[in-house]
Amino acid sequence: MTREQLEHLIRAASTIADDDGIVVIGSQSILGQFPDAPAALRVSMEADLFPLHHPQRWDLIDGSIGEGSPFHTTFGYYAQGVGEETAILPNGWRDRLIAIHGPGTRGATGWALEIHDLLLAKYAAGREKDRAFAREAIRHGMVREETLLARLESLAVPSARLTEIGATIRREFREEREA
C-alpha cells in the first residue's frame, strides 16, 4: 500500500462513518510516520481503521469498503473496520498518534500509531507475520530498542508474556547488530 492509497481509505472511511478523524492501527499505520517506508513493510493491501469520535461505527467501514467490497474490487486495496480494542497498545499511545494530512484525505485526518507503539502491538499479537514486520523495521533502523523496552511494561498482558516479548525484542536487536 502507498501513502496515497492510505489517504484514499481515510477519506472514504471518514465519509462513511461521518467522522473527521480515522485511527489506523494496523501495519499500514507505518505510513503516517514513514510515508516512504520500505516496500517490505507496505505489502499489506488492507488498513485496519476505526473512527476516532465514533469508534462503534467501525462496522460501517468494514461493510462499505472492506474485503470483497466493490471498493476493494475497483481499487485493489481495502479497509478493515476494527474495534478500538483490537490491538494491545502501551499506555499513552493516543498521545503519540501521528497525524496524516494530505491531498487525498480532503480535510479528514488520519491518526497513525507511532512506530514503537505499532511494533509493541505486533509483538503482543505474536503472529509470525507480525514478528517478521517487527524484524524488518529493526533491520531498517526505524525503532530504538530502549524505547520498545521502556514502553513494554505498560502493555496489558500477563507478566510472563511481558518477559517473553522483552526477550524477543532483545534477541532480535542482538541478531541485527551481529548480522
Image (cartoon, rainbow, N blue to C red):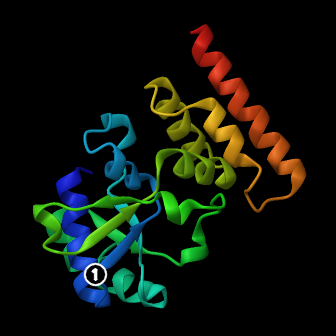
In screen coordinates, is 103 left or right of 130? left
Q: Residue furthest top?
A: 178
User: Residue drawn 31% across and 86% down?
Assistant: 19
- Residue that numbered label 1 is attached to: 20
Q: Residue furthest left?
A: 103
Q: Nearer the viewer, residue 129 or 104?
A: 104
Residue 132 showing in the rendered view: yes
Q: Residue furthest front?
A: 95
In screen coordinates, is 42 left or right of 173? left
User: Residue drawn 60% across and 54% down?
Assistant: 121
**How many marks are shown on the rendered structure?**
1
Residue 43 showing in the rendered view: no
Residue 15 percent coordinates (x, y): 22, 85
63 vs 158: above or below: below
Q: Nearer the viewer, residue 64 or 25?
A: 25
Could you say whether the residue bearing mark 1 is in a helix, strand or loop? loop
The quadrant in which residue 38 appears is top left
Q: Nearer the viewer, residue 52 or 25?
A: 52
102 vs 175: above or below: below
User: Residue drawn 62% across and 38% down?
Assistant: 147
The quadrant in which residue 90 appears is bottom right
Residue 63 percent coordinates (x, y): 35, 86
| Disc 1: CA contacts within 10 A as few (<14), some (14-19) or many (>=20) | many
Residue 74 percent coordinates (x, y): 14, 69
User: Residue drawn 28% across and 91% down?
Assistant: 18
Residue 7 percent coordinates (x, y): 21, 63
Q: Amino acid at mark 1?
A: Asp
The quadrant in which residue 8 appears is bottom left
